[in-house]
Image (tube, helix red, strand yellow):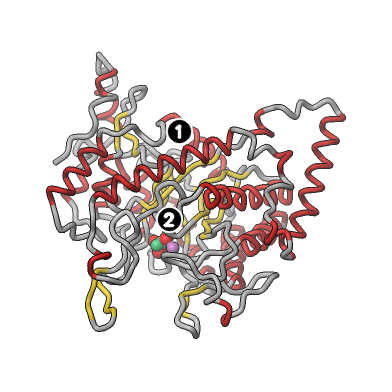
Amino acid sequence: MLQPNGGLLALISTPVWANLVDMRSSSSWNPGSWKTRSAAQQPDWPDAFALERSLKVLSGLPPLVFAGEARSLSASIAEVAAGRAFLLQAGDCAESFNDFTADSIRDKLRVILQMAAILTYGAGVPVVKVGRIAGQFAKPRSAPTEIVDGQEIPSFRGHLVNDDAPTLEARLPDPTRLLDAYNQSASTLNLLRAFAKGGFADLSQVHTWNREFVAQSPGGQRYETLASEIERALRFMRACGVDLAASALREVDFWTSHEALILGFEEAMTRRDSLTGDWYDTSAHLLWVGERTRDIDGAHLEFLSGISNPVAAKIGPTASPAEVVELCDKLDPDRVPGRLVLIARMGAGKVAGRLPALIDSVRSAGHPVAWTCDPMHGNTFVGSGGRKTRHLDHIMGEIGEFFDACRREGTWPGGVHIELTGDDVTECLGGTEEVFEDQLELRYTTTCDPRLNGGQSLDLAFQVAELLRR
Ligand code: PEP
Ligand code: CO
């Protein structure tokens, strides 16, 4: 088994934190303790030595994020849990090694900034911005293999593991991809940090975030009006003597997240923080466990239980109240606000019957979680042309039901979790510039699930802002 990187440890001469650490985490936890549990959704790596080689290299590479950043995100999520902020978690279903350009990163960031501006200005709540980006490369699958042209081949598991081309050769898990994913994540994060702090996200740029094809859509035009209002408000503030050079207006915090699925990769990225002695998975600020891997005794929960990053769990329609409370006990035994986000993904029509009991039992058990809604994964269906798709009406339907359920339970509807792209794709149906079923073929470029395009993302943000205002 690999030993976690000793580099940061070596910075500390006296392990004053050692006792503290042992008191805080279960004594049997370590970054590799997940291996004592059953791990669902792991690839059959054909070459164990090549895998070990990649993991060893990874464990010696610099962290992608810093523990202090993860703690800042926890503090922001605590604001969400307390009902004082809204979490916008959004990005690709699966990032691609093939679609990796500065433009595509910028365009994803800009649609998220537009949505955040709509929510902040339209509803008056601070928005915590978390991308499904800079590491979202691994996918759980419903079956380990599929039949293509009569041949059984391994399923596509995300570019962290194999290629999406439907051939036996492309689908063989290749551990050199772990290093490619690290490198692509590092470059992506570098650019995101530059955009977030270097002027691109400056609120005075609110007009320039609208891309041409989006600006022509009804959602984009509505956004233009809102951007003009924001500019007018900024002029007013300047005239009143407010310093617009203040960093709160010129810079944003933009955080990264992905599903912690391939546990060897996550283990290799896990390091001990030299300031606190706590373990952090340095591959992203926030890690989540998916609907298919949240088994209470399984390897994924074991891994997430010991890292100090904020963590999230998808909660689907079959989850029982007892099961969800057990999950909270495992991931957040100390009941720390900002530690745990529960992402309900029930499917439209299923929320009212299932979510209230879950909210109630989690609250009764004293867990200060942030509840958010993923309206994407419970609303996927196969269109008449054979493409997987989702309809914006169903997506908005589930968000509306989520808001209703939270309000009935006296809980803050803390956020949304959205699959989107800045590109002008035709993958999801509906929207004010409507995409119809016979248009899905036009620009369907996702490597996994269908994403909202820029116009549909703005439509969604306007409707969520209205829900928040009520
Ligand atoms: C996902 O977020 O891409 C995903 C697979 O979600 P879930 O685990 O909720 O199905
Ligand atoms: Co998805």
The residue wearing badge 2 is 95
Please tell me whether mark 2 sits on a helix, a strand or a loop. loop
Locate residue 458 relative to residue 76 in the image: left or right: right
Locate residue 44 relative to residue 230 in the image: left or right: left
Q: Nearer the viewer, residue 316 or 210?
A: 210
Which comes before the other along the chain, label 2 or label 1? 1
Image quarter of residue 309: top left
Percent coordinates x, y for residue 55 in the rendering? 22, 43
What residue do we see at 12% from left, 48% from top?
49
Q: Are marks 2 and 1 in contact (CB under 8 Å)?
A: no
The residue wearing badge 1 is 71
> Label for residue 445?
none
Residue 363 visible in the displayed image: no
Q: Nearer the viewer, residue 18 or 150?
A: 150
Mark 2 to mark 1 CA distance (whole Å):
25 Å
Amino acid carrying mark 2 in the image: Glu
Q: How many neighbours does mark 2 have within 10 angstroms: few (below 14), some (14-19), or many (20 or more)?
A: many
Percent coordinates x, y for residue 166 in the rendering? 31, 71
